[in-house]
Protein backbone atom coordinates (compact mmCIF):
# COMPACT_ATOMS: atom_id res chain seq x y z
CA UNK A 1 0.00 0.00 0.00
CA UNK A 2 1.34 3.43 -0.95
CA UNK A 3 1.49 5.91 1.91
CA UNK A 4 1.32 9.55 0.88
CA UNK A 5 2.73 12.40 2.93
CA UNK A 6 0.12 14.14 5.05
CA UNK A 7 -0.27 17.91 5.44
CA UNK A 8 1.19 19.77 8.37
CA UNK A 9 -1.52 20.69 10.84
CA UNK A 10 -1.94 24.42 10.25
CA UNK A 11 -4.87 26.79 10.53
CA UNK A 12 -4.31 28.82 7.38
CA UNK A 13 -3.25 26.19 4.81
CA UNK A 14 -4.48 22.68 4.13
CA UNK A 15 -1.97 21.18 1.71
CA UNK A 16 1.56 21.86 2.97
CA UNK A 17 3.37 18.54 2.68
CA UNK A 18 6.93 17.29 3.00
CA UNK A 19 8.28 15.38 -0.01
CA UNK A 20 10.40 13.27 2.31
CA UNK A 21 9.75 9.65 3.18
CA UNK A 22 9.28 8.20 -0.31
CA UNK A 23 11.33 5.28 -1.63
CA UNK A 24 14.02 6.58 -3.97
CA UNK A 25 16.97 5.45 -6.03
CA UNK A 26 19.41 5.68 -3.12
CA UNK A 27 17.08 4.92 -0.22
CA UNK A 28 14.39 7.29 1.08
CA UNK A 29 13.80 10.92 0.15
CA UNK A 30 14.96 13.19 2.97
CA UNK A 31 12.49 15.06 5.12
CA UNK A 32 12.86 18.74 5.81
CA UNK A 33 14.25 19.65 2.38
CA UNK A 34 11.32 20.27 0.01
CA UNK A 35 7.74 21.12 0.93
CA UNK A 36 4.90 21.48 -1.57
CA UNK A 37 2.05 23.76 -0.58
CA UNK A 38 -1.15 25.59 -1.34
CA UNK A 39 -1.56 29.35 -0.79
CA UNK A 40 0.06 31.02 2.21
CA UNK A 41 -2.09 34.16 2.28
CA UNK A 42 -4.12 32.99 5.28
CA UNK A 43 -1.29 31.70 7.44
CA UNK A 44 -1.56 32.72 11.07
CA UNK A 45 1.37 33.90 13.15
CA UNK A 46 1.37 30.49 14.81
CA UNK A 47 1.44 28.79 11.38
CA UNK A 48 4.47 30.85 10.37
CA UNK A 49 6.22 29.95 13.62
CA UNK A 50 5.47 26.27 12.95
CA UNK A 51 6.98 26.44 9.46
CA UNK A 52 10.10 28.26 10.67
CA UNK A 53 10.48 25.72 13.47
CA UNK A 54 10.06 22.96 10.88
CA UNK A 55 13.05 24.40 9.05
CA UNK A 56 11.52 26.34 6.15
CA UNK A 57 13.97 29.03 5.10
CA UNK A 58 12.84 29.95 1.59
CA UNK A 59 9.38 30.32 0.02
CA UNK A 60 8.97 30.21 -3.76
CA UNK A 61 5.61 31.52 -4.95
CA UNK A 62 4.58 30.11 -8.35
CA UNK A 63 1.35 32.09 -8.66
CA UNK A 64 0.51 34.72 -11.25
CA UNK A 65 1.04 38.45 -10.72
CA UNK A 66 -2.69 38.89 -10.23
CA UNK A 67 -2.87 36.24 -7.51
CA UNK A 68 0.12 37.70 -5.71
CA UNK A 69 -1.36 41.20 -5.86
CA UNK A 70 -4.75 40.25 -4.41
CA UNK A 71 -3.64 37.42 -2.12
CA UNK A 72 -0.10 38.21 -0.89
CA UNK A 73 1.71 35.53 1.06
CA UNK A 74 2.30 35.79 4.78
CA UNK A 75 5.85 34.51 5.29
CA UNK A 76 7.27 36.29 8.33
CA UNK A 77 11.05 35.85 8.48
CA UNK A 78 11.18 33.25 5.69
CA UNK A 79 12.88 34.37 2.46
CA UNK A 80 10.35 35.06 -0.29
CA UNK A 81 10.78 34.74 -4.07
CA UNK A 82 8.12 35.09 -6.75
CA UNK A 83 8.54 33.02 -9.93
CA UNK A 84 5.20 33.33 -11.69
CA UNK A 85 4.24 30.30 -13.75
CA UNK A 86 1.23 30.13 -16.03
CA UNK A 87 -1.88 28.51 -14.73
CA UNK A 88 -4.64 29.59 -17.09
CA UNK A 89 -7.47 28.92 -14.68
CA UNK A 90 -6.08 31.00 -11.84
CA UNK A 91 -4.42 33.67 -13.96
CA UNK A 92 -7.69 34.35 -15.79
CA UNK A 93 -9.87 34.08 -12.72
CA UNK A 94 -11.41 30.85 -14.04
CA UNK A 95 -12.75 32.70 -17.08
CA UNK A 96 -12.53 31.40 -20.62
CA UNK A 97 -12.70 27.85 -21.85
CA UNK A 98 -9.60 26.66 -20.02
CA UNK A 99 -7.48 23.66 -20.98
CA UNK A 100 -9.05 20.47 -22.28
CA UNK A 101 -7.74 18.59 -19.25
CA UNK A 102 -5.25 19.08 -16.45
CA UNK A 103 -2.79 16.99 -18.45
CA UNK A 104 -3.01 19.57 -21.26
CA UNK A 105 -2.02 22.27 -18.79
CA UNK A 106 0.91 20.26 -17.40
CA UNK A 107 2.14 19.53 -20.91
CA UNK A 108 2.01 23.27 -21.63
CA UNK A 109 3.96 24.06 -18.47
CA UNK A 110 6.71 21.56 -19.30
CA UNK A 111 7.03 22.88 -22.85
CA UNK A 112 6.62 26.61 -22.28
CA UNK A 113 7.75 27.36 -18.72
CA UNK A 114 11.15 25.64 -18.83
CA UNK A 115 13.02 28.87 -18.03
CA UNK A 116 10.81 29.46 -15.00
CA UNK A 117 11.22 25.86 -13.88
CA UNK A 118 14.98 26.28 -14.15
CA UNK A 119 14.79 29.43 -12.01
CA UNK A 120 12.82 27.57 -9.35
CA UNK A 121 15.35 24.75 -9.28
CA UNK A 122 18.25 27.19 -8.94
CA UNK A 123 16.53 28.95 -6.03
CA UNK A 124 16.00 25.66 -4.22
CA UNK A 125 19.54 24.46 -4.89
CA UNK A 126 20.90 27.59 -3.18
CA UNK A 127 19.41 26.53 0.16
CA UNK A 128 22.15 24.53 1.87
CA UNK A 129 20.47 24.18 5.29
CA UNK A 130 16.78 24.00 5.98
CA UNK A 131 13.85 23.56 3.64
CA UNK A 132 12.47 25.20 0.51
CA UNK A 133 8.70 25.54 0.25
CA UNK A 134 7.17 26.01 -3.20
CA UNK A 135 3.51 26.70 -3.76
CA UNK A 136 0.70 27.93 -5.98
CA UNK A 137 -2.95 28.45 -5.05
CA UNK A 138 -4.11 24.89 -4.43
CA UNK A 139 -0.74 23.16 -4.42
CA UNK A 140 -1.92 21.02 -7.33
CA UNK A 141 -0.95 22.21 -10.83
CA UNK A 142 2.16 24.39 -10.97
CA UNK A 143 3.25 22.89 -7.67
CA UNK A 144 2.44 19.42 -8.96
CA UNK A 145 4.76 19.78 -11.95
CA UNK A 146 7.67 20.94 -9.77
CA UNK A 147 7.03 18.14 -7.27
CA UNK A 148 6.94 15.59 -10.09
CA UNK A 149 10.32 16.74 -11.39
CA UNK A 150 11.92 16.69 -7.92
CA UNK A 151 10.63 13.20 -7.17
CA UNK A 152 11.70 11.96 -10.60
CA UNK A 153 15.15 13.43 -10.02
CA UNK A 154 15.41 11.46 -6.78
CA UNK A 155 14.36 8.23 -8.50
CA UNK A 156 11.00 7.90 -6.77
CA UNK A 157 8.82 5.23 -8.45
CA UNK A 158 6.10 6.72 -10.60
CA UNK A 159 3.27 5.12 -8.67
CA UNK A 160 4.33 7.21 -5.67
CA UNK A 161 4.56 10.36 -7.78
CA UNK A 162 1.01 9.76 -9.03
CA UNK A 163 -0.25 9.07 -5.51
CA UNK A 164 1.43 12.18 -4.12
CA UNK A 165 -0.21 14.27 -6.84
CA UNK A 166 -3.63 12.68 -6.41
CA UNK A 167 -3.75 13.39 -2.67
CA UNK A 168 -4.36 17.12 -3.17
CA UNK A 169 -7.94 16.48 -4.23
CA UNK A 170 -8.56 14.87 -0.84
CA UNK A 171 -6.75 17.40 1.31
CA UNK A 172 -8.26 20.41 -0.47
CA UNK A 173 -11.81 19.07 -0.71
CA UNK A 174 -13.41 21.56 1.69
CA UNK A 175 -11.44 24.47 0.25
CA UNK A 176 -12.49 23.56 -3.28
CA UNK A 177 -16.16 23.49 -2.28
CA UNK A 178 -15.85 26.97 -0.77
CA UNK A 179 -13.98 28.30 -3.81
CA UNK A 180 -16.64 26.96 -6.15
CA UNK A 181 -19.43 28.56 -4.14
CA UNK A 182 -17.62 31.90 -4.03
CA UNK A 183 -16.98 31.79 -7.78
CA UNK A 184 -20.61 30.93 -8.51
CA UNK A 185 -21.71 33.92 -6.44
CA UNK A 186 -19.61 36.08 -8.78
CA UNK A 187 -21.04 34.47 -11.90
CA UNK A 188 -17.98 32.33 -12.59
CA UNK A 189 -18.21 28.61 -13.24
CA UNK A 190 -15.39 26.38 -12.08
CA UNK A 191 -15.54 23.15 -14.04
CA UNK A 192 -15.31 20.05 -11.90
CA UNK A 193 -12.13 18.70 -13.51
CA UNK A 194 -10.30 21.91 -12.61
CA UNK A 195 -10.53 20.94 -8.95
CA UNK A 196 -9.58 17.33 -9.49
CA UNK A 197 -6.17 15.68 -9.28
CA UNK A 198 -6.99 12.55 -11.21
CA UNK A 199 -4.25 9.90 -11.36
CA UNK A 200 -4.55 9.61 -15.15
CA UNK A 201 -3.62 13.28 -15.59
CA UNK A 202 -0.28 12.73 -13.88
CA UNK A 203 0.25 9.37 -15.61
CA UNK A 204 -0.34 11.05 -18.98
CA UNK A 205 2.07 13.81 -17.98
CA UNK A 206 4.77 11.29 -17.09
CA UNK A 207 4.22 9.39 -20.35
CA UNK A 208 4.46 12.61 -22.33
CA UNK A 209 7.59 13.64 -20.45
CA UNK A 210 9.36 10.34 -21.20
CA UNK A 211 8.49 10.47 -24.88
CA UNK A 212 9.60 14.06 -25.41
CA UNK A 213 12.38 14.63 -22.88
CA UNK A 214 13.72 11.12 -22.12
CA UNK A 215 14.89 11.76 -18.55
CA UNK A 216 14.63 14.50 -15.95
CA UNK A 217 18.38 15.24 -15.78
CA UNK A 218 18.48 16.00 -19.51
CA UNK A 219 15.35 18.11 -19.30
CA UNK A 220 16.63 20.22 -16.40
CA UNK A 221 20.13 20.68 -17.82
CA UNK A 222 19.40 21.18 -21.49
CA UNK A 223 15.86 22.57 -21.59
CA UNK A 224 15.62 24.44 -18.29
CA UNK A 225 19.24 25.54 -18.03
Image (cartoon, rainbow, N blue to C red):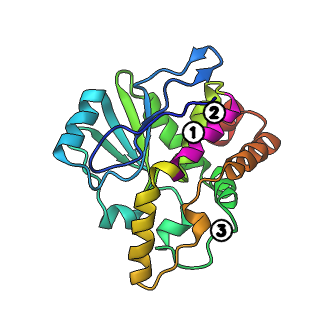
Front-lying residue, 40 or 212: 40
Horizontally, is 224 left or right of 13 in the view?
Answer: right
Q: Which mark is residue 164?
A: 1
Q: Is residue 196 left or right of residue 66?
A: right
Question: What is the C-alpha distance between the residues marked 3 and 2?
Answer: 25 Å
- Tell me where the magenta segment starts and ends, as one range: 157-169
Mark 2 burial class by Cα count in 10 Å: few <14, some 14-19, many 20+: some
Residue drawn where x is 53% and y is 22% of the image: 29
Q: Is residue 145 visible to us here?
A: no
| Quadrant showing the N terminus | top right
Q: Can you give x and y, in whole percent of width and height, for residue 38 in the image? A: 41, 50
Residue 177, position as x, y percentages in the image: 44, 66
The residue singled out by tag 3 in the image is 99
Instruction: Residue 157: give x, y in percent of width and height.
Output: 68, 28
Q: Mark 3 or 2 closer to N-term?
A: 3
Residue 197 visible from this viewpoint = yes
- Relative placement, left or right, of 64 versus 98 is left
Seen at 46% across and 29% down, the residue is 125
Q: Are marks 1 and 2 in contact (CB under 8 Å)?
A: yes
The answer to which quarter of the image holds residue 23 is: top right
Q: Is residue 139 above or below residue 181?
A: above
N-terminal of the pair, mark 3 or mark 1, is 3
Instruction: Give the dominant element type of the magenta stretch: helix, strand or loop.
Output: helix
Front residue of 181/130: it is 181
Q: Residue furthest bottom?
A: 187
For this view, does 104 lie left or right of residue 98?
A: right
Please identify the quadrant where the C terminus is shown.
Answer: top right
Verify whether residue 97 appears in magenta.
Answer: no
Q: Nearer the viewer, mark 3 or mark 1?
A: 1
Judging by the rendered image, the residue that carries numbered circle 2 is: 160
Label 3 and label 1: CA atoms lie apart by: 22 Å
Amino acid sequence: MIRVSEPLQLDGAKNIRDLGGYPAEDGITARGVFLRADGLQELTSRDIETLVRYGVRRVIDLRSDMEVKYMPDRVGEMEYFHVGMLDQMNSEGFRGTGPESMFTLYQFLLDNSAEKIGEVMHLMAEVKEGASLFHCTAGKDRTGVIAMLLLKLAGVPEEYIVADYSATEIYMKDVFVRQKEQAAANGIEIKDYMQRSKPEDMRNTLDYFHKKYTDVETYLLQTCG
